[in-house]
């Protein structure tokens, strides 16, 4: 006689392999599922640690950027400006340099503006030029083009003196030199001039002179 069939419970029904599937394969499938679940659980803390590391690196970079200090501007004793191969007369520029030497940049600009507006002349006693009105004037001219070019250089050297931190600025050196001039039509030479202007502190320059 056949043994009476015993009804299976719910857990036992799930654990039993279906028809045609060997029990070894069922065991391997279970182990694979358990391994995958473990790997997922293990990956989550790794992801958290990686995110924390990236955030820490960003915070360190931000701190380094804040720590960077601004460079201190070093003060200088001299401010210089040059003009090369200017299209002005070297003879006229020589006499203009004489009248601006020893003046402050602002006073020098005002003096040259008076020449452009024909209020005051540039003394040129060494040249054969017409006499002008004024005390002690043997001869003079109104070299407007030269004054306009030199005003630009005076403004430039004034800006350089402000950056250098020079107080009580005065034009200590104002020099003009003849530059190499190109030839024009009919073999004539053009007029070209180099200009060099230096500004120093008035109090320091007086102290050195003493």
Image (cartoon, rainbow, N blue to C red):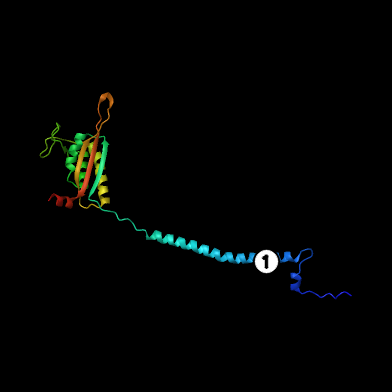
What number of labels is visible?
Answer: 1
- For this rendering, which residue is in front, 56 or 176? 56
Q: Which residue is disc 1 drawn over?
A: 31
Q: Farthest right residue?
A: 1
| Residue 7 in the image: above or below residue 159 | below
Does residue 188 sit above or below 198 in this rendering?
above
Looking at the image, residue 43 sits to the left or right of residue 175; the answer is: right
Residue 23 on image: x %, y %: 75, 66
Q: Residue at 74% of width from left, 70% of height from top?
A: 15
What is the residue that sits farthest to the top in this orientation? 186
In this view, the residue in front, 179 or 122, is 179
**Identity of the residue furthest to the front in this view:** 24
Q: Position of residue 206 (x, y in %)?
A: 15, 51
Crowding around mark 1 (Cα neighbors within 10 Å: few <14, some 14 to 19, many 20+) is: few
Q: Residue at x 52, y 63 (%)?
A: 51
Q: How far across and how far down the image is residue 104, in percent?
A: 20, 47
Q: Is residue 119 visible from the viewing direction of this image?
A: no
- Location of residue 148 with respect to 6 vertically, above or below: above
Residue sticking out furthest to the left = 136
Q: Secondary structure at mark 1?
A: helix
Q: Quadrant of residue 190?
A: top left
Camera sees residue 177: yes
Residue 148 sits in quarter: top left
Q: Quadrant of the N terminus?
A: bottom right
Q: Residue placed at 21% from the left, 41% from the top? A: 112
Q: Position of residue 91 (x, y in %)?
A: 19, 34
């Amino acid at each position: 006689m056949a043994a009476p069939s015993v009804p299976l419970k719910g857990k036992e029904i799930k654990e039993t392999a279906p028809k045609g599937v060997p029990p070894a394969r069922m065991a391997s499938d279970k182990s694979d599922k358990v391994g995958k679940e473990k790997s997922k659980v293990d990956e989550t803390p790794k992801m958290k640690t990686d995110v924390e590391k990236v955030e820490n690196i960003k915070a360190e970079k931000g701190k380094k950027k804040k720590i960077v200090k601004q460079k201190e501007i070093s003060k200088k004793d001299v401010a210089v400006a040059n003009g090369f191969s200017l299209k002005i007369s070297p003879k006229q520029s020589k006499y203009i340099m004489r009248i601006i030497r020893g003046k402050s940049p602002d006073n020098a600009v005002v003096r040259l503006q008076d020449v452009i507006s024909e209020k005051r002349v540039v003394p040129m006693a060494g040249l054969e030029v017409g006499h002008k009105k004024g005390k002690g004037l043997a001869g003079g001219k109104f070299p407007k083009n030269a004054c306009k070019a030199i005003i630009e250089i005076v403004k430039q050297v004034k800006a350089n003196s402000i950056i250098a931190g020079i107080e009580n600025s005065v034009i200590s050196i104002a020099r003009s030199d003849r530059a190499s001039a190109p030839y024009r039509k009919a073999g004539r030479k053009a007029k070209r001039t180099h200009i060099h202007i230096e500004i120093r502190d008035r109090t320091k320059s007086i102290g050195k002179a003493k």
